[in-house]
Amino acid sequence: MGMTRRRVGKGLLKMFCHVRLSLVRTEVKDSLFFNTTLKDGSPLQKAKTQLSEFNNIQYILDMATYLTQEGYDKKMKELSELEAQRPMIKQAIAEARDKGDLSENAEYDAAKEAQGMLEMKISKIKELIASARIIDDSKLNTEIVQLLNKVTIKNVKTGMTVTYTIVTENEANLREGKISSNTPIAQGLMGHKVGDVVKVNAPVGVLEFEILKIEI
């Protein structure tokens, strides 16, 4: 299919930047607003430079599609299954065309519409695969919460525990206990360690969760 996969050893590091960027940006912007220095003593000019660099990093992150090997393989399988439907739809179009006047041929219109939907799905998956970066899971650890970790947390108020695996947006599936790294819960957990209590802004208000376990 003319597509190649690019395995990025620093994929996890870049994904971790998503979490840290918002924190660092806040500090930098505060420095710019109050005309002060950063916590590390960086001068104002350096703060401006850092803010520009962080914005560039965010742009690069947004351009890429991060997938696990499992997620990539699923997309490749889905693409193959969709492409296998092309001959069948072409045959349906040909048979409908043979029935006469196309202007009043409902079967022909339906077949053409199905073809359009199929090609749109194929095109979307191809674009996703073309920009995909395979996350190197050999870099995983359980010291802090990061992408692909399975995390067990406890609601401080209710005492209820739940386990989630933090995955990329394209692989999120709540029924399988997989939540996107872009969700408020995942954003609140990433970068923290066992024993930390994190606050998460949810539709029902601010929730507090204690991290009980981090697994691979």
Image (cartoon, grey):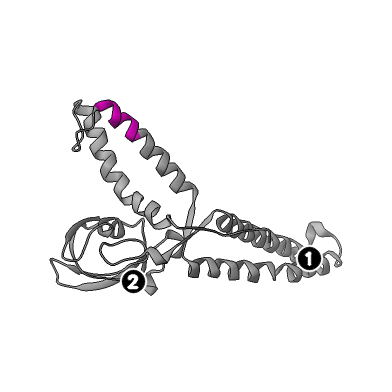
In the foreground, 29 or 43: 43
Residue 142 figure quarter: bottom left
Determine if the magenta segment contains residue 81.
Answer: no
Left or right: 194 as drawn, with respect to 181: left
Residue under the point 85% across and 60% down:
101
For numbered disc 2, what is the local secondary structure?
loop
Disc nearer the start of the sequence (2/1): 1
Determine if the magenta segment contains residue 49.
Answer: yes
Left or right: 16 as drawn, with respect to 61: left
Residue 22 figure quarter: top left
Image spot of residue 146 (x, y percent): 32, 61
Residue 93, numbered circle: 1
Left or right: 183 as drawn, with respect to 162: right
Residue sitting farthest toward the left: 157
Residue 135 figure quarter: bottom left
Q: Specify whether residue 102 is in view.
A: yes
Image spot of residue 199 (x, y percent): 19, 56
Q: What type is the residue that disc 1 sits on?
A: Ile
Q: What type is the residue that disc 2 sits on?
A: Ile
Dominant secondary structure of the residues highlighted in magenta in the image: helix
Q: Please rate how many residues cluster around mark 2, counting C-alpha atoms within 10 Å: few if below 14, some from 14 to 19, many from 20.
A: some
Q: Which residue is mark 2?
A: 216
Q: Quadrant of the N terminus?
A: bottom right
Vertical arrangement, residue 125 with respect to residue 214, above or below = above
**Range of magenta residues:** 44-51
Vertical arrangement, residue 5 with respect to residue 24, above or below = below
Structural distance between the alpha carbons of marks 2 and 1: 49 Å
Residue under the point 44% across and 48% down:
61
For numbered disc 1, what is the local secondary structure?
helix
Foreground mark, 2 or 1?
2
Image spot of residue 98 (x, y percent): 87, 67
Q: Please rate how many residues cluster around mark 1, counting C-alpha atoms within 10 Å: few if below 14, some from 14 to 19, many from 20.
A: many
